[in-house]
């Protein structure tokens, strides 16, 4: 008895119990159901690793915050890549705006073309000069693209349900998104432009702006103290005119991407190999070149208005402001058109879009409206490509995580029901 009880159980009996053969089970009998209680969470392949938990969380997020995050990340990436070119473009656009009104000599050009301007900035300020304004640029790109992309996508989806003309719906959505982001971030872009147009102390007085800021927060503080809240909205009118730029670029981009890839912005195929990066890049380049060429003069107007210093008049009769006696590194030159030591009324050189156009045309000619356009094109196209490629890549990752998260949640629901 003891010898018989010490023998191990027959493997044939165990096999027949958990894996019945075709001979033991009739053909008409249903297959045995799996035992969910004996299956642990670790044995489910979709739940392994931190990416699975992330996918589940992503699948529960609404599209609005995701579009905002993808847009902000894309803007930051393009800002880091193209900041030196943006500095060069700003210097070329602002050239001539710091010349005193009493200056009657020949116009002296300091910045000449892309390479010439880069060489001048490098010799005067070094590598730091090429990245002036990077702080407010990155600070501005986050809310700009977050507001723009989330507003654009939500407005477009809303209008597509009510309008048959998709091109018109995209145009209205791009203008709405552009206006929203412009009102929110205009103060940041004014500070960025001021910092980028700031030159070295070794520059000639006629090309030296009437301010000196140590950093972004110092610029905010000094502008608010000396010029008031209105200074942060300098150039708002031409910035709103710049809505024509996005009204051309984004509808045209979606149209071209649809032609090249068969997908709209932010959409991707079921598999990664179905994403046509060449088509996305071609649509980005063509749409950006067309929009920039058609709307470039407004950027010059915006830069001139943003780099013009607004001085608060002192407490004197008829708002007369005495600034000629000020000294120091921040007051080495007087702003063009502002008050002088003889007490003339403080009137800015550039007042409004139409008057600014008239002043530039009389003093510098029509070519001034296209100062820095070549450099801007060299900057704008890589910036647009970086922005859209980053946005499309992040949207692709989001779609993959969302699909995987939905699949995991469905399988988890099946496990819990069993």
Image (cartoon, rainbow, N blue to C red):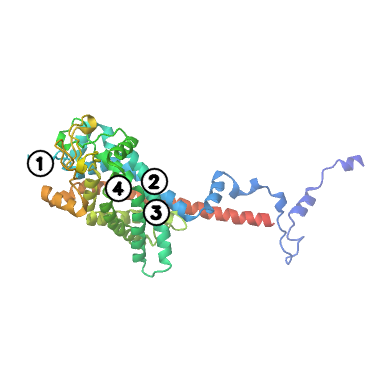
Residue 417 is drawn in which quadrant? bottom right
Above-or-below relation of 102 to 326: below
Residue 191 position within the rendered picture, expressed as x and y whole percent measured from the top left:
30, 41
Cα–Cα gap, marks 2 and 1: 39 Å
> How packed is label 4: few (under 14 Cα within 10 Å), some, or many (20 or more)?
some
- Please give the name of the residue rendered at 54% of the width and 47% of the height, measured from the top-left corner: 54
Q: Which residue is mark 1?
A: 107
Q: Is residue 30 left or right of residue 134?
A: right
Residue 72 position within the rendered picture, expressed as x and y whole percent measured from the top left:
40, 47
Q: Which residue is mark 3?
A: 149
Which of the marked residues, 3 or 4, is nearer the chain's N terminus? Answer: 3
Which of the marked residues, 1 or 3, is nearer the chain's N terminus? Answer: 1
> How packed is label 2: few (under 14 Cα within 10 Å), some, or many (20 or more)?
many
Cα–Cα gap, marks 1 and 3: 43 Å
Residue pushed farthest right?
1
Residue 197 position within the rendered picture, expressed as x and y whole percent measured from the top left:
24, 39
Frontmost residue, 341 versus 362: 341
Helix, strand or loop status at disc 4: helix
* Mark 3–mark 4 CB contact (< 8 Å): no
Which is closer to the viewer, label 4 or label 1? 4
Q: Which residue is mark 2?
A: 142
Above-or-below relation of 327 to 22: above
Q: Which residue is mark 4?
A: 233
């Amino acid at each position: 008895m003891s010898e018989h009880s010490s023998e191990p159980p027959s493997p044939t009996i165990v096999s027949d119990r958990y894996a019945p053969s075709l001979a033991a089970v009739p053909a008409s009998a249903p297959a045995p159901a799996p035992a969910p209680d004996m299956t642990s969470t670790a044995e489910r392949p979709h739940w392994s690793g931190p990416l699975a938990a992330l996918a589940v969380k992503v699948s529960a997020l609404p599209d609005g915050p995701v579009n905002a995050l993808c847009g902000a990340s894309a803007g930051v990436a393009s800002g880091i890549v193209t900041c030196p070119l943006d500095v060069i473009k700003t210097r070329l656009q602002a050239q001539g705006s710091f010349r005193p009104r009493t200056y009657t000599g020949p116009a002296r050009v300091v910045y000449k073309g892309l390479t010439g301007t880069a060489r001048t900035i490098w010799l005067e300020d070094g590598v730091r000069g090429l990245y002036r304004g990077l702080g407010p640029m990155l600070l501005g790109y986050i809310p700009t693209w977050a507001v723009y992309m989330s507003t654009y996508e939500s407005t477009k989806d809303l209008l597509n349900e009510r309008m048959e003309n998709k091109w018109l719906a995209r145009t209205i959505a791009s203008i709405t998104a552009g206006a929203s982001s412009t009102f929110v971030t205009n103060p940041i872009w004014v500070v960025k432009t001021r910092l980028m147009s700031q030159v070295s102390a070794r520059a000639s007085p006629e090309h030296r702006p009437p301010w000196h800021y140590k950093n972004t927060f110092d610029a905010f503080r000094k502008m608010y103290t000396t010029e008031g809240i209105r200074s942060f909205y300098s150039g708002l009118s031409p910035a709103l005119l710049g809505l024509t730029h996005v009204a051309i670029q984004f509808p045209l981009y979606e149209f071209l991407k649809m032609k090249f890839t068969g997908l709209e912005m932010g959409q991707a195929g079921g598999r990664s190999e179905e994403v046509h990066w060449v088509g996305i890049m071609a649509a980005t380049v063509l749409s950006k070149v067309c929009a920039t060429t058609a709307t470039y003069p407004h950027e010059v107007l915006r830069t001139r208005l943003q780099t013009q210093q607004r001085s608060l008049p002192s407490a004197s009769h008829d708002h007369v402001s005495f600034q000629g006696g000020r000294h120091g590194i921040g007051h080495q030159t007087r702003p063009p058109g502002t008050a002088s030591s003889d007490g003339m009324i403080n009137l800015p050189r550039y007042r409004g879009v139409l008057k600014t156009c008239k002043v530039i045309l009389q003093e510098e000619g029509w070519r001034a409206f296209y100062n820095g356009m070549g450099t801007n094109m060299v900057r704008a196209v890589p910036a647009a490509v970086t922005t859209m490629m980053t946005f499309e890549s992040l949207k692709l990752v989001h779609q993959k995580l969302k699909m995987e998260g939905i699949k995991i949640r469905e399988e988890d629901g099946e496990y819990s029901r069993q």
